[in-house]
């Protein structure tokens, strides 16, 4: 079952529409009540958060994970839209573990040095590797986690794509490529459209 904690994004990534929506969060107790009702009435144990940048609301996410960890229920969470790697700190890792988060996506995006700047990403492949190393040191089981990366960026070299793929394999992540979408009125469209 899907659930939302937040909506919108402060980033203005050149290929994404989420940054064009104002940011807001949903009340934590209402979200938890929804999860509990769904679990009790259906027996479903797995809940998937579908927020594009939930970790951007770090205090909100941390409070939610603390509350979920306190529940007396066999509930498991996923954050498949991803957690920005530059925002994954040691406290967040502990809350992911105690908050019953069994999987999430780490956006590796690209190994191209030009990628983060051109696409206006606030993080790079180096940020992702640092986060993965922190997770590994904390003995976080990454085997159900995904590594997303963009394919189809015209200036990207094949070596960049294989580098990201090998990083995903090295950390035992599920490799999840996705094709770039060129949106009108974006820098990507202006350059390549």
Image (cartoon, rainbow, N blue to C red):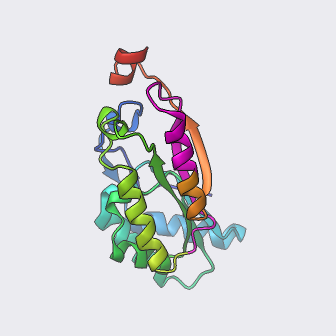
x, y (%) of residue 128? 41, 57
x, y (%) of residue 40? 65, 73
Which residue is rendered at x = 29% and y = 67% of the image? 59
x, y (%) of residue 18? 39, 38
Residue 167, visible in the rendered structure: yes
x, y (%) of residue 106? 48, 56
Which residue is rendered at x = 50% and y = 69% of the image? 33
The region drawn magenta spans 141-165
Please tell me which residue lies in front, 85 or 70.
85
Which residue is rendered at x = 36% and y = 44% of the image? 8
Q: Looking at the image, how many numbered discs can be counted on the residues?
A: 0
Please tell me which residue lies in front, 87 or 49.
87
Whether 156 is among the magenta residues is yes
Whether 7 is among the magenta residues is no
Rendered-image quadrant of the N terminus = bottom right
Rendered-image quadrant of the C terminus = top left
Quarter of the figure with residue 95: bottom left
Quarter of the figure with residue 132: bottom left
* Lateral position of residue 62 relative to residue 180, left or right: left
Quarter of the figure with residue 56: bottom left
* Lateral position of residue 182 relative to residue 114, left or right: right
Please tell me which residue lies in front, 95 or 136.
136
Q: Is residue 85 above or below residue 192?
A: below
Please tell me which residue lies in front, 120 or 91.
120
Residue lying farthest front?
A: 159
Residue 26, visible in the rendered structure: no
């Amino acid at each position: 079952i899907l659930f939302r904690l937040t909506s919108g994004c402060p980033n203005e990534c050149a290929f994404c529409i989420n940054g064009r929506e104002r940011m807001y969060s949903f009340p934590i107790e209402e979200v938890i009540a929804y999860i509990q009702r769904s679990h009790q009435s259906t027996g479903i144990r797995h809940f998937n958060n579908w927020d594009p940048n939930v970790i951007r609301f770090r205090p909100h996410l941390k409070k939610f994970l603390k509350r979920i960890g306190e529940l007396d229920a066999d509930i498991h969470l996923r954050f498949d839209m991803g957690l920005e790697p530059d925002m994954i700190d040691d406290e967040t890792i502990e809350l992911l573990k105690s908050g019953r988060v069994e999987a999430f996506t780490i956006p590796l995006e690209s190994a191209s040095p030009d990628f983060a700047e051109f696409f206006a990403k606030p993080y790079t492949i180096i940020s992702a590797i640092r986060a993965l190393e922190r997770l590994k040191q904390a003995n976080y089981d990454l085997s159900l986690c995904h590594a997303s990366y963009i394919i189809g960026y015209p200036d990207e070299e094949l070596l960049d794509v294989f580098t990201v793929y090998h990083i995903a394999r090295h950390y035992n992540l599920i490799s999840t490529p996705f094709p770039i979408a060129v949106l009108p009125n974006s820098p990507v469209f202006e350059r390549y459209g």
